[in-house]
Amino acid sequence: MDKHRNRFSSNIYMKAAALIAFGFLVLVFLFSGIISFVLEAEGCYDGTDHYAMTSEAMSYAAEDAFRAANYYYEIQGDNVSMNNIYGSNMTNLSLSIYSPDGSELLYRNKSDTDPVSSGSIYLYSFTHSDGEEADNNSLPNTYLDFSYAYDIDFSNISENHEIIYKIDYSLPAEMNIHDEYYYPSMYFDFLYAHKKTWIPTAIISALILIFITLFLFKGAGRRETDQEIHLNWIDRIPLDLLAGIVALLVFPLGIFLIDETAIGNGYRIINITPGYLILNIAMILAGFLPILYLVLGFLLSFATRVKAGKWYQNTLIALAFSASARIIKAIPSVLKTLAIYVAFWLLFIFFWAGYHPRMIHIFMIFLGGVTIIWLVYEIKQIQKASDALAKGDLDYKIDEKELFGSFRKTAEDLQSVRNGVSLAVEEQMKSERLKTELITNVSHDIKTPLTSIVNYVDLLQKAHTKEEEEQYLNVLARNSARLKKLIEDLVEASKASTGNITAEIVPTNVQEMISQAVGEYQDKLEAANLQTVITVQDPSLSVMADGKLLWRILSNLLSNCVKYAQSGTRVYIDALSMNNHVKITVKNTSRDALNVDPDELMERFVRGDKSRTTEGSGLGLNIARSLTELQNGTFTLSIDGDLFKAIITLPEAP
């Protein structure tokens, strides 16, 4: 199941579809999320149901009222000119301009309005100086400027401020005149009409987006042909360099989005016509999608590196540190010590001319003494370890954590030598023991049938009956065959271990080979009261092997089952594909306790039956291992209590 899921996430077409869906869903999530946020900020879920009631509309209405009053002041109250720009058929904004105290109406552009939002501002003027002297006098230049306020404290007005007008403004619920409020109202009505869909859309798109993101990260670096992690040319670029390249590409695109689109206007939609809106959407997509996929590509490359392991090694920083370490390592220890000594005295000279020289001198002398003591201690630790190794004390272990620099490296080298010597001694002792056992076992296995043959030949030479002669001949035939089989196995083991057997490697069907071997041993298996259970993952499963040699391996394993398996149990033979190899497993329950190491069982003349009372040469597993290795495979044994398991691993045929 996991294999199929991995292949699903590694499929190139699924990845392409996921990438397209990712970009689309990000846009849907951002679009619906921003709309939901804006509608919530404007109170559309709490009663604001017209564009005129939004803070954006009222803010622009106040600014328009200020500009209108300023223009009214410039044209000196010319109502005709005022109506040419702010007349009832020119704008949706209703204006009423009053005297500063609001007692006298000076101008009104609409009389029959039904506003849903309204406000008031005061137009005032003030003078300010630029601080520079005028041409013909010593007084600084002064300027008259205008601004507006929502509220005025008439009792606290400075001398350089003058209240000019009070302006009332309002916006209707229905925007019928094509001015700067018309299209925003139309957009708002559309968004408000679907206000219940934006939040669910954002949530659903976010959930699907999370699933697709996980899918893409799971498939990052994988191919459908296998489940290994593959690095492409982008993944081989140093990570921090790739981050810099992505940043250099993303930065100008971000500047473009801010400067050239409505994003830089804080997402305000005032005075945006449908054509300009479509242009903005196209420009945003042209800038945002490359940013999105550049960042996604960087993250997927990072995920691939993490899966491959040691991602931090392929960075410019790591490469710089590695190069520095190699350079420092290449510097002789004498030069390193000299550099430290020079640095020490440079610090000493520097502080000599500094503040509090006496304290600095004391500190430097103390630091030098500590350094000398530390060096002596480090050298002493190395000397003790080398003396112990020279005396053959392989149990002595130096604490490498207490050492630094070259001393630690030397200690690690001594530890490696100690481990190597210990391993060599252990292997030599094991070899000597196996050699002794080999001589003993060979002597026993040859001597037993040979002694029997000699004894029965002697009996035949003496007086005997016809029935006794027939019995003696049967014993002679059985022991002769046993001795012949032992010699043949020994010769075959010698050839297999030295590679003197020619292997013809061709695609070989696994199920056919297993069935053939089981068929050959069916009578013996039934006589031993053993039942075989064969499980092959795929009937067409094939390996690159020599059919004759593979049959001999299976034959040896089944022969072992007949000799040593517990009567009335099952013999399991499984075959499955794994990482371009086929694993063939033969499992059985042992009749006797297996108190022997699996590696020793594969040595020559080593048998699970320590008493050596059963038939067999103890060469079958050794031959099976050699023949498997001859076919570019591996042969391993596993023992768990009474469960004996032999595992043959061979390359899978293409």
Image (cartoon, helix red, strand yellow):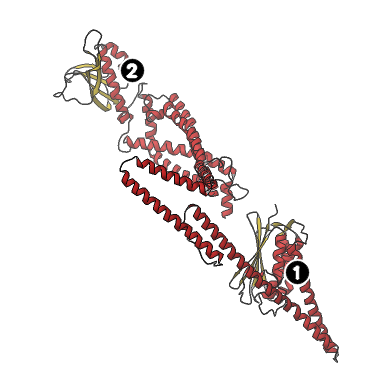
| Cα gap from disc 2 to disc 1, whole angstroms | 104 Å
Q: Tell me: 612 left or right of 185.
A: right
Q: Is residue 637 above or below residue 276?
A: below
> x, y percentage for residue 47?
30, 36
> Which residue in the rendered view is the most extreme toward the top?
136
- Rendering quarter of residue 177: top left
For discs 2 and 1, the disc positioned in front in the rendered view: 1
User: Dot 1, crowdedness within 10 Å: few (<14), some or many (≥20)?
Assistant: few
Label 1: element kind:
helix
Marks 2,1: beta carbons within 8 A: no
**In-front residue for pair 393/518:** 393
The amino acid at mark 2 is Met
Residue drawn at (63%, 77%), measured in percent from left and top?
592
Return the residue at label 2. Answer: 90
The amino acid type of the residue labelled 1 equals: Glu
Q: Which residue is mark 1?
A: 520
Q: In the visual, does 27 lie left or right of 495?
A: left
What residue is drawn where x is 16% and y is 21%? 158
